[in-house]
């Protein structure tokens, strides 16, 4: 009698091992660049990291010491402005495309979002220079935030749309059937059901623009001094890293490495914090 | 208290396909009325026309009039949201809100309409879950577990509790037991039987035994038309239309 539990043939076992090995290797190759970059950053940057680096502004050329405190704060301001602009617009466009849009206009919006996603970031910088900086006659944190916000929109809009489409229609019907107004049903039932994926999209967009240098070159511009005014030019970590990395001074090179390390740590910290905050109060799903 | 329903000359379409043809029917208050008929005969569309869920589907339209209790459902200026709040609906597949706890699921209809009084909410949630015979099974995990973590039969009773929590005047059930095992089905049928003391219930079912067990009145639909509508006993023993007889004796459908 044939048994279902008979041992696998040698060939089957070999090919099984072979494919598990290949899949593992692929996973390793994905991890390798990240691990390499991060460990090299730690190796190069950790030496220049100290309390002064986190709390002081840059010293004049030729003087040792100083830090990037103004750039850390500046990046936070620019990213804050970018998020205030990009997150609601992106989620709103996503909701429109998934829940309300039918026909040609939606297709135009979706196509535009995809094209915007593919536009080089420096072009976004130039556009914002023309739209915000020129009329204002000066560089500002605000214009930098606008540039980053514009870059966040397409990613957020498209992920929001995709995530909302995955919410089964029966959930929408349940909400409407209870006599809940459409806007509330969309925001508090449908969007809430898709919130995990939407937040992932927001975090992806945030992490991507947090490291952008090019769109800030002619907008936030950079600044060697403290600035908390969104209407003034501001330092930002990527700009500071760029300026220091192409300088001829060894001390600045070391600081550029430290700045890059801080940038990555801050992005990871922000993403983790959002994950923790948004997962609070969620309920058990397993039976 | 439940309300009576009067439907006049109701026709409904999806695009160009007509799915309901001039339905006229009077449904009594505080009774259970079953709607039976083969797949595609328009029974689901019929009950979705009663609470204006039909129009949520693109290209759906209808003509005719529906009176539920005091309100003229399709009068111009009548708010669809208000109609749906007065008429509860339970769907074919259990559809609890997956990101909400059991408590939040039951409270959703009130909360999302702006009701905020916590103590009263607690009472409504408990009362609704007791009515749907789910309270004892979930009272210890009300706020800990997601509605989606329950079994299929429990989920459907949760959906019934959710519909009851907004205190509707009429409860529509679209094949509420079709995805459930016989034990869960039995519990829900028992529940329907109790509900009619306070509500008017209209239930669509594929299961003729179920109609015979729970319904006081039964309407038989065929190809978008209401063929026969009478006391359940009469429909299942001495139907006056040949097509009804053919259907209930299993000759087609």
Image: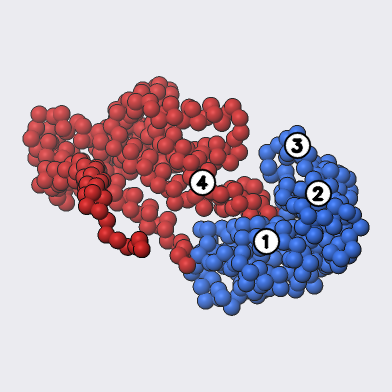
Residue position marked by numbered label 2 in the rendering: B222
Residue sitting nearer the eye, B115 or A26: A26
- Specify the label residue B176 is tagged with: 1
Q: Looking at the image, is mark 3 or mark 1 earlier in the sequence?
A: 3
Image position of A20 with respect to B61: above or below: below
In the displayed structure, does residue B141 sit left or right of residue A102? left
Task: Say which chain tag 3 marks.
Answer: B
Q: CA distance from mark 4 to mark 3?
A: 28 Å
Q: Color of chain B here?
A: blue
Q: Which chain is red?
A: A
Circle 2 SS class: strand
The residue shown at (45%, 41%) is A159
Q: CA distance from mark 2 to mark 4?
A: 35 Å
The residue shown at (25%, 38%) is A237
Callout 3 crowding tier (Cα within 10 Å): few <14, some 14–19, many ≥20: few
Residue B37 screen position, x and y as percent: 77, 54
Give the colouring mode of the picture. Answer: by chain
Q: Are marks 3 and 1 on the same chain?
A: yes
Q: CA distance from mark 3 to mark 1?
A: 26 Å
In this view, which residue lies farthest toward the front?
A: A1
Q: Are marks 1 and 2 on the same chain?
A: yes
Residue B166 screen position, x and y as percent: 70, 63
Query: Can residue B80 be seen in the rendering of this structure?
Result: no
Quadrant for the N terminus of chain A in the image = bottom left
Q: Are marks 4 and 1 on the same chain?
A: no
The residue shown at (85%, 52%) is B243
Q: CA distance from mark 3 to mark 2?
A: 15 Å
Residue sitting nearer the eye, A177 or A262: A177
Q: Looking at the image, is mark 3 or mark 2 earlier in the sequence?
A: 3
Residue position marked by numbered label 3 in the rendering: B17
Residue position marked by numbered label 4 in the rendering: A166
Residue sitting nearer the eye, B130 or B194: B194
């Amino acid at each position: 009698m044939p048994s279902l539990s008979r041992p696998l043939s040698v060939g089957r076992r070999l090919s099984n091992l072979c494919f598990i090995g290949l899949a593992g290797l692929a996973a390793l190759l994905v991890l390798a660049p990240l691990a390499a970059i991060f460990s090299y950053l730690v190796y190069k940057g950790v030496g220049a990291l100290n309390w002064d680096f986190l709390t002081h502004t840059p010293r004049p050329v030729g003087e040792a010491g100083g830090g990037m405190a103004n750039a850390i704060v500046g990046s936070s301001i620019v990213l804050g402005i970018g998020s205030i602009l990009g997150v609601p617009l992106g989620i709103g466009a996503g909701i429109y495309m998934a829940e309300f849009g039918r026909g040609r206009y939606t297709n135009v919006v979706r196509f535009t979002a995809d094209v915007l996603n593919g536009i080089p970031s420096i072009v976004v910088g130039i556009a914002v220079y023309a739209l915000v900086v020129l009329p204002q006659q000066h560089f500002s944190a605000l214009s930098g935030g606008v540039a980053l916000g514009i870059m966040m929109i397409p990613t957020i809009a498209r992920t929001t749309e995709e995530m909302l489409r995955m919410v089964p229609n029966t959930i929408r019907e349940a909400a409407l059937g209870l006599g809940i107004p459409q806007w509330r049903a969309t925001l508090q039932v449908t969007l809430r059901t898709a919130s995990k994926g939407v937040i992932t999209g927001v975090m992806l967009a945030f992490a991507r623009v947090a490291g952008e240098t090019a769109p800030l070159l002619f907008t936030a511009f950079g600044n060697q001094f403290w600035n908390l005014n969104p209407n003034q030019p501001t330092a930002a970590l990527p700009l500071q890293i760029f300026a220091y990395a192409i300088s001829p001074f060894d001390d600045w090179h070391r600081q550029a490495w430290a700045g890059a390390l801080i940038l990555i740590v801050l992005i990871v910290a922000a993403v983790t914090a959002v994950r923790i905050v948004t997962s609070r109060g969620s309920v058990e799903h397993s039976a | 208290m439940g309300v009576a329903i009067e439907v006049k000359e109701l026709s409904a379409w999806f695009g160009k396909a007509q799915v309901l043809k001039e339905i006229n029917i009077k449904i009594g208050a505080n009774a259970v009325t079953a709607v039976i008929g083969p797949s595609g005969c328009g029974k689901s569309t019929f009950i979705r026309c009663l609470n204006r869920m039909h129009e949520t589907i693109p290209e759906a339209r209808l003509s005719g009039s529906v009176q539920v209790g005091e309100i003229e459902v399709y009068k111009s200026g009548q708010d669809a949201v208000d109609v749906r709040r007065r008429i509860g609906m339970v769907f074919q597949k259990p559809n609890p809100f997956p990101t909400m706890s059991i408590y939040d699921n039951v409270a959703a209809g009130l909360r999302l309409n702006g009701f905020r009084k916590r103590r009263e909410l607690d009472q409504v949630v408990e009362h609704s879950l007791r009515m749907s015979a789910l309270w004892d099974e979930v009272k210890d995990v009300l706020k800990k577990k997601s509605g989606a973590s329950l079994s299929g039969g429990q989920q459907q009773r949760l959906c019934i509790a959710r519909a009851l929590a907004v205190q509707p005047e009429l409860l529509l059930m679209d094949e509420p037991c079709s995805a459930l095992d016989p034990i869960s089905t039995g519990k829900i049928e028992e529940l329907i039987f109790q509900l009619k003391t306070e509500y008017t219930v209209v239930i669509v079912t594929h299961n003729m035994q179920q109609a015979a067990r729970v319904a006081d009145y039964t309407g038989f639909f065929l190809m978008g038309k209401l063929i026969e509508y009478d006391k359940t006993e009469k429909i299942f023993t001495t139907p006056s239309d040949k097509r009804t007889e053919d259907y209930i004796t299993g000759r087609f459908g």
